[in-house]
Image (spheres, grey):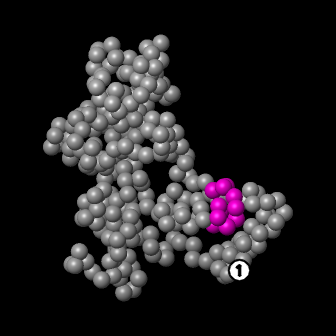
Amino acid sequence: MADRPAAEVRTTCPYCGVGCGVLAEVAADGAVSVRGDPDHPANYGRLCSKGSALGETMGPNGRVLAPEIGRRQASWDEALDLVAKRFADTIAAHGPDSVAFYVSGQLLTEDYYVANKLMKGFIGSGNIDTNSRLCMASSVAGHRRAFGEDVVPGTYADFEAADLVVLTGSNTAWCHPILYQRLMAARRERGTKIVVIDPRRTATADECDLHLAIDPGTDVLLFNGVLAHLARADAIDQNYVAAATSGLADAVAAAIA
């Protein structure tokens, strides 16, 4: 990395969950330019249109440059003092659970740590939420039931090595463009088959090998049918399932019922 400019810093794109590595260079006038980090294992130097435009978000145009109180421009000290006083007065009158934080899903891990430390460690309340939960709550619940904890068991390299990739309710082409590019490259190089399960006709569905446009709310019915078919066709790797999972017999019985 010796050829990197002195003012270039390594960071992470805040938009989608792919977590692309970004190299940001700050010019003498404060302008920021970005490029993909060629050493990052998520994107290997590639950025989508959103990540490529990150530098444009750092300028003053279209930004709120000063706080306002009742439509009146105020100083940062005045605004922060007002927020702190309102929080303190509310907590004094009603207790720490009378206040809450609702934070962005586009923060970095360090930002979430500070916000959680402030709410849970200093204020003494667990009332902190984020819009990430709206899109990830079902995934977290599924991972905990399936794997015992909120963990994604695969890697991007696993996608590229797979013979078949099934995308459920995901317009990956728009929502996770760099991962989609890696899938398309694997398809060209290895012949990876892609199945999309989505009631909508999306850009991802346009490029897949099979689009199952099921009715909304029939996901469980479809998956039960697939499991029942695999069981009846004796197409389940019993040795692997016995070593890596539990409860398959009950799941098959429920699917067939």
Seen from the viewer's position, the closer of residues 12 and 72 is 12
Give the residue furthest to the bottom.
Answer: 28
Q: Secondary structure at mark 1?
A: helix
Instruction: Please state, as top left, top right, bottom left or bottom right, where the N terminus lies in the image.
Output: bottom left
Residue 236 horizontal side relative to residue 256, left or right: left
Kindly tell me whether residue 20 is visible in this rendering: yes
Question: What residue span does the magenta drawing correspond to?
Answer: 118-128
Q: Residue at x 34, y 17 (%)?
A: 231
Seen from the viewer's position, the closer of residues 147 and 254 is 147
Image spot of residue 68 (x, y percent): 68, 74
Does residue 246 lie above or below 149 as drawn?
Answer: above
Does the magenta portion include 256? no
Image spot of residue 149 (x, y percent): 48, 43
Residue 81 horizontal side relative to residue 181, left or right: right
Does residue 256 lie above or below 245 as drawn?
Answer: above
Choose top left, top right, bottom left or bottom right for residue 39: bottom left
Q: Residue at x 31, y 47 (%)?
A: 155
The kind of residue tagged 1 is Glu
Kindly tell me whether residue 255 is visible in this rendering: no
Q: Residue at x 41, y 70 (%)?
A: 56
Residue ID for mark 1: 78
Choose top left, top right, bottom left or bottom right for residue 256: top left
Seen from the viewer's position, the closer of residues 236 and 33 is 236
Residue 121 horizontal side relative to residue 21, left or right: right
Q: Residue at x 45, y 75 (%)?
A: 59
